[in-house]
Amino acid sequence: MREKVIFEYSRPGRGATDQWPQAVPEATDIPSHLRRSVPAMLPEVSELEAVRHFTRLSQLNFSIDTHFYPLGSCTMKYNPKACNQYAMLPEFLARHPLAPESHGQGFLACMFELQEMLREVTGMQGGVSLTPMAGAHGEFAGVAMIRAYHRARGDLARNEIIVPEAAHGTNPATATMCGCVVREIPVNAEGDVDVEALKAVVGPKTAGIMLTNPSTLGVFERRIEEVARIVHAAGGLLYYDGANLNAILGKVRPGDMGFDVIHMNLHKTFSTPHGGGGPGAGAVGVSARLAPFLPIPIVGKEGERYRWLSESDLPQSIGRLSAFMGNAGVLLRAYIYMRLLGREGMSQVGEFATLNANYMLARLKAAGFDAAYPTRRASHEFIVTLKRQARELNITAMDFAKRLLDHGFHAPTTYFPLLVPECLLIEPTETEAKEVLDAFIAAMIHIQKEAEEEPEHVRAAPHTMPVRRLDDVRAAKQLDLTWKPTATKSTASVPLPA
Amino acid sequence: MAFIPHTEKDVAEMLGAIGASSIEQLFDEIPANLRIKSLAGIPPALNEMEIGRLMSARAKLDGRPLNFIGAGAYEHHIPSAVWAITTRGEFYSAYTPYQAEASQGTLQLLYEYQTMIASLTAMPVSNASLYDGASAVAEASLMAVRANRKSKSLRILVPTSVHPHYRKVAVATAGNQGLRFEEVPFAPNEGRVAVDSLAKYDGQDITAIVIQQPNFFGVLEDVDAITDWARERGIFVIASVNPTSLAMLKPPGEWGSRGGADIAVGEGQPLGVPLSSGGPYFGFITTRMEHVRQMPGRIVGRTVDLEGKEGFTLTLQAREQHIRRAKATSNICTNQGLLVTAATIYMSIMGPVGLQRVAAASHARTRELVTALSRVKGVRPAFVSPGFHEAVVVLDRPVAPVLKMLEARGILGGFSLAEHYPELGNALLVCATETKTSEDIESFANALGDVMKAARAA
Amino acid sequence: MSNVPADLKYTRTHEWVRDLKDGTLEIGITDHAQHALGDLVFVEVPETGRQVGAGEPCAVVESVKAASDVYSPLAGEVMAGNPELGTTPELINTDPFGAGWLMRLKPANAAMLSELMSPAEYESVLKAEGA
C-alpha cells in the first residue's frame, strides 16, 4: 500500500484549528492590488492526519538510527541524541540572530570554544570561521580566500586551480564559481597524485591546489610534503578538502602537512545530522597568512567577554556568506559532540575508523573481492571494484548496491570516484561494532554467489523495498515535479478576504 | 567515549584478520614526522550528565528576553508536532536520497514541499532548498545570467530596500563570476523604490532586478509596476519574498501583467524553523518551467518503478556538481533537508487558513505596536506606506543607548538602522508577530516611555 | 563496436560532420557518444543565426547520468537546429547519424572540412579509448 501524497487527504474545511491564532479584523491598509486573491494550495488535514502521514513517510527511510550506512566519503557515524537535546534547549532556540551580545554570552562561549577546538585538531593557527553552511560552501570560502590573498599582493594572473582527476565534483564546480580555471592532474596506479604531472602544470598562473588527504581513493597521499613544496615554490597555496578528516582525527593535522586553508564537514567528522540532505556546516580554518581574509562574522574574546568580529575588524575579509552567522544550531551540536569526546575520544576516532575499514578490506579481499589499491592500507574507507563481475557475469556495482538494500544495509557509495570502474567506496566509521561489519561482509559474499548462480535475481534487485528500481529516464523526460489536483485549481475551501 | 563499541577481544580478532600487530601499524603509510602525539589543546571528555549541566548553564546566561526584532528572522509559534516528527531518527539521521528505494520517505516529503512552495509563490516549479534566503538571491542572480540569453551585461539591479546582509552575500558569492550588483536607492520618505527612479536605466542592458516583498523595512513595494517595467525591457525579475506574507500578499507568479516574476526566492525560516541564533534556516527557489534546467540544487520528481508503481527520485541531476563538475549550475551539494522537513510538516498542520491567520495576526500586532510606540514622546513612524509585519520608527535621540536600557529590562526593542541606513536618522526597525500579546506590546511601550524620559532628564 | 559511417568526417570529441553539398554542413554526435551517454532526456540546440567558433561549445546533450557539451567542429553560422529534438531527444540514440542530427552550419571556411578526422582516424581514437 503506497502512502498517499498529503494533498490526497485534504478535505475542504479540515484543519488543525487549535494551532491557528485568533482571527483579526480585515487589514484595511493594504491596497487590493497587493493582496492575494486565490489561496495557496496547502493541505487541509487534521493534526493527527498530518502526524500519521509524516510518521509513515519516515518509516520508508533507511537511516543511521535504523541501518548500517557505509557510505564512503559521507562518514555516517552515530548522531548522539545528547547533541540534539542540548542544542535545542529553549533559550538557544529562541535566541534571535541579531540579539545583543549581552544576551548571548552563553551561545558565544560555545561558538568561541568550537573555533578553538577546530583550530587545535586541524593545526590551522590563523583561525577558524564557522559561517559556511555546507562543505561546498566552505570550499567556496577557501578558494575565494586564496584568490583574495593573491589579489591583495597584486598577483592578478593567478587564476588556475589544480584539481586531481579523482576529486569530488564540488571541487571543480567551486573553482568555477570563484572565477578560476580548473587544471586537472592525473593520479597514478598506486592512488597517489602524479607528482611529475603536477610539476608540469604549476607556474605563475597557479593560484592553488585542492586536495583531499586521505584522498577520495581511500588512501593517504604519501608524497604530500613534496606536493606542498612544489606548489608553494611556484607561489600557489594548498587547499585541504576535509571530507576525509575522520581518518586522521587525532593522528595527523592538515596544518602540519603544509595546507594553507581547510574546510571541515561538521556533518561528517563531527557527527551533526545528515537530515535527509542537510543542514551541514563547512567551517574553514586557515594558516596565518590567510587570516585577514576569513569570512565574517567570527567570535572574538576580549578579557572574559565574547563579541562578534565583523567587517570593521576584518577589512580584508572575503565578506559575508550567510544572512546571519551560518548554521548556528548545527554548530552547537558539533560543539557538544567535541566536548563529549574530549581529547581522549578524538584521538580514538581516527584509530577505530581506520581499524574498521582495514578489517573490512582484509575480509573482503579474503572472500575474493578485488580492492582497487590492494597493496595500500585503507584509510577510514577503501574501494572495491566490481569490474570483473561486470565483465564476467554482467553484474554491476549498481546491482550489488540494490541487492544490499534487500539485506538491510544501505549501499556504499557507488561510481565515485569516477576513476575506478564499477566501484564501491566503503566507509564503516568508528561507531559500528564488529558483528555489523561481519554481517555486511556475509551479505556481499551471498550476493556474489547469487550473481554466479541466479544473476537475474541480483539484476532485478531490490525486491523487498517500498519500490523497485525507478525509471530515471522517465523522471527526467516527463517532468512531474509538483502534485496537481485532477479537478479544481485549488483545494482550499475558505476564501481569503477580498 | 567517542561512541566506540569495540572490546579488547574485538580489536585482537580484527587485527588478526588484517595481519597487523597493533592499530598503530595501520598508520604506517603516514610519514612519522607528521604524526601528532596528542591533542593537548582539547579539554578532557565530559560525560552526558556533565555536558547537560554546562549547556543548561550557558542557556540560562542568554535567557529569554521579550523579542521585537525581525530583520529577516521571525518568531512564530511552532506546533509541537513539527519537531517531534522532524527529529525522528528516520528523518534526522538519513542521508541525501541518492538511493531512491531506501529514501522514499524523504523523497516524497520533498515532492510535497516542492508542491507547497510552488503554490505559495504561484510559480510552476521549485527545487528542494538552498542554504538560506541571502544565498538564494545570489544563486538566483547567477541563474538569471545563465537563463537571460538576451542580456550580456551581468548587471543586477538591487534596491537598497533589500536586506543589507542579502546584498553583501550576493556580492561575496557571485562577484567572483563577474556579476555587478548595482544599488537602486529607495525613496527616503516612502521607504520603497519609486518606479520612475528606474527610468535612468531605460535603454541599458540590465540582466535582472531584485525586488524584495515586503522589503527590509516591512514596507510593500509597488511590485506590479516594477515587474512590468522590467519585463517590458527583457530584464529578469527576481522576487525575494517572505513565505508567511504570501498567505496575504499577491505572490510573485502574479506580479504585473506579463506572467509574473521569472525567479522567486526567499528565506523559509518563518515556516516552522526556530530563530536559533540565525541558523540552520533554508532558502527556497521557484521559477517558470522554461528555466527549470537552470535552477541550482536538487529537484525531486515522481516516476514509476519496474512494476509500474509510483515512486519518487532525484532528477535532472546531470546539471549538478557531482556529474557536471566544472560546468555545474552551482557547487551546492548538501542543502537544508531537515529544515525543509520541518517546514513541510508546519505547512501541512497550519494549512492555508492557519497560515493566513498567522500573517493577518502578525500584521495586526505590528500595527498595534507602531501605534503604541508612536504615543511615546519622541517616537514617530518613519514611513506612511503600507507594510506587512515590520515597521521603522524614528527616535528623537540615538537608538543604541535606548536599546541598551531596554535590554536591561529584558526587552529586545528592535534592530537599529544606524549602521546600514544612517540617512534615516535615529531609526529603529521593530516587529511584532502573532506571538506577541497586547500586554507584551503595552510593556514595551511603557518601558520605552520610561527609558526615553530618563534619557531626556539625563 | 560502434558504427562509424564511411562518408562522414569526425572530431576527437565525438562529433560527426556531413557535407550537404549545398554550402552547408550537417553535424551530430556519434554512435559511440550516444551509447556512452545512455538514454537522452534533453537536448539544447543553438539558435539559428548564431556565429560559432571552431571548438566552441554550441549545444548540450543531457542524459540521466551526464550533461555533455557538443563542440562545433568548424567556425561558421548556425543555419538550423533540429526541431524534433525538443520533443524526441531519443532520436539521437536510435538514429545518431540520420534523424538525430543536431544542427546545420554554414562554415566560414569550407576548406577546413578536410582537416577533420577520417573514419579510420576516428576509429583509432575509439580503439585507444578502449571503446
Image (cartoon, coloured by chain):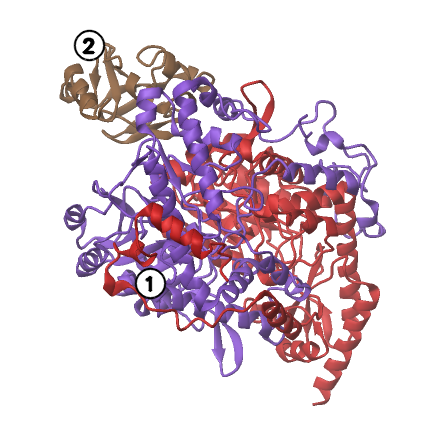
Chain colours: A purple, B red, C brown
Q: Which mark is residue C6?
A: 2
Compared across the picture, whether A224 is left or right of A478 comes to left
Q: Nearer the viewer, residue C80 or B347?
A: B347
Compared with residue C10, is residue B62 higher up or lower down, i.e. above or below? below
Viewer-proximal residue among B256 and A418: A418
At mark 2, the secondary structure is loop
- Asked whether residue A243 is in view, the answer is no
The residue carrying mark 1 is A253
Asked if one can make out residue B221 in the rendered structure from this viewpoint, the answer is yes
Query: Helix, strand or loop at disc 1?
Result: loop
Circle 2: residue type: Ala
Q: Could you tell me how far apart the alpha carbons at marks 2 and 1 are, in whole angstroms?
A: 58 Å
Instruction: Tell me residue A416's x, y (percent).
Output: 37, 38
How many C-alpha atoms fall within 10 Å of the one at disc 1: few (<14), some, or many (≥20)? many
Q: Is residue A222 left or right of residue B432?
A: left
Measuring 32% from the left and 70% from the top, which residue is drawn there? A288
> Along the line of sight, which residue is nearer the eye, B279 or A214?
A214
